[in-house]
Image: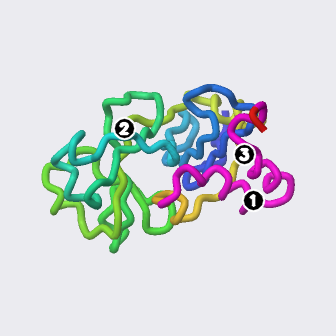
């Protein structure tokens, strides 16, 4: 198999007929993508648990009251942190703009570099070799380049519609679809 075109830094927007409850109306940021598979974070699933309550050592990275986001169904006990870095060289890996992953193990929040903002995710989305490509070919996902403001959006509930509107055309019409068309 040849090298796949990496979708790192792109968004996967769940197509309206993707009914898997883990991914219905989600927007996933692809953080890694290659021949071995892909990894991403659901950007629009805030939980009701604050970072301060769930992982007190990381509370210093986020604003008071910020919640943990559900990054996906894989390893929900694993924490992944994305930060908007003042100096991108501090990131473990940049994904889009100045936003990248913080190192996996954070012993002291003062050691991660200067951040404009950060977001804590529990779990992630993962695909085996070729699986994501198959799902895209089946039209389960709509692919769109990510913008930095998508990643740390203040309106996670509106992100699905926002990205589809930006893509334009028939996608802009989809953006207006209610969560449950049967209730329309």
Quadrant of the drawing holding the N terminus:
top right
Which image quarter: residue 92?
bottom left
Is 11 drawn above or below residue 90 in the view shown?
above
Q: Position of residue 90 (x, y in %)?
A: 30, 65
Residue 180 sits above or below residue 110 on the image? above
The percent position of residue 74, horizontal first and vertical second, equals 44, 28
* Quarter of the image where one finds residue 3: top right
Residue 172 in the image: state x and y as whole percent: 79, 56
Q: Which labelled disc corresponds to residue 167?
A: 1
Label 1 element class? helix
Residue drawn at x 21%, y 42% is 53
Query: What numbered label is drawn on residue 100?
Result: none
First in sequence: mark 1 vs mark 3: 3
Residue at the spot of label 3: 142
Question: Residue beneath label 2, please?
Answer: 122
**175 in magenta:** yes
Which residue is found at the position 51% from the left and 62% from the top? 96
In this rendering, the answer to whether 160 lies above or below 72 is: below
Q: Is residue 2 left or right of residue 88?
A: right
Q: Give the alpha-carbon distance from disc 2 to disc 1, as whole Å.
A: 28 Å
Q: Is residue 166 magenta?
A: yes
**Dot 3, crowdedness within 10 Å: few (<14), some or many (≥20)?**
some
Q: Start and end of the magenta stretch?
A: 154-182
Q: What is the crowding at mark 1: few (fewer than 14 residues within 10 Å), some, or many (at least 20)?
A: some
């Amino acid at each position: 198999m040849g090298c796949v075109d990496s979708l790192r830094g792109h968004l996967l927007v769940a197509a309206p007929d993707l009914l898997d409850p883990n991914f219905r109306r989600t927007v996933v940021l692809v953080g890694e993508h290659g021949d071995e598979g892909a990894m991403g974070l659901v950007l629009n699933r805030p939980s009701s648990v604050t970072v301060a309550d769930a992982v007190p050592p990381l509370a210093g990275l986020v604003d008071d009251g910020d919640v943990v986001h559900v990054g996906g169904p894989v390893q929900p006990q694993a924490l992944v942190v994305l930060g908007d870095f003042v100096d991108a060289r501090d990131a473990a890996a940049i994904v889009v703009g100045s936003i990248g992953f913080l190192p996996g193990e954070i012993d002291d929040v003062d050691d991660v570099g200067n951040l404009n903002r950060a977001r804590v995710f529990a779990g992630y989305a993962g695909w085996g070799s070729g699986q994501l490509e198959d799902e895209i070919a089946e039209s389960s996902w709509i692919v769109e380049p990510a913008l930095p403001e998508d990643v740390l959006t203040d309106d996670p509930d509106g992100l699905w519609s926002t990205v589809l509107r930006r893509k334009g055309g028939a996608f802009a019409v989809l953006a207006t679809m209610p969560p449950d068309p049967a209730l329309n």
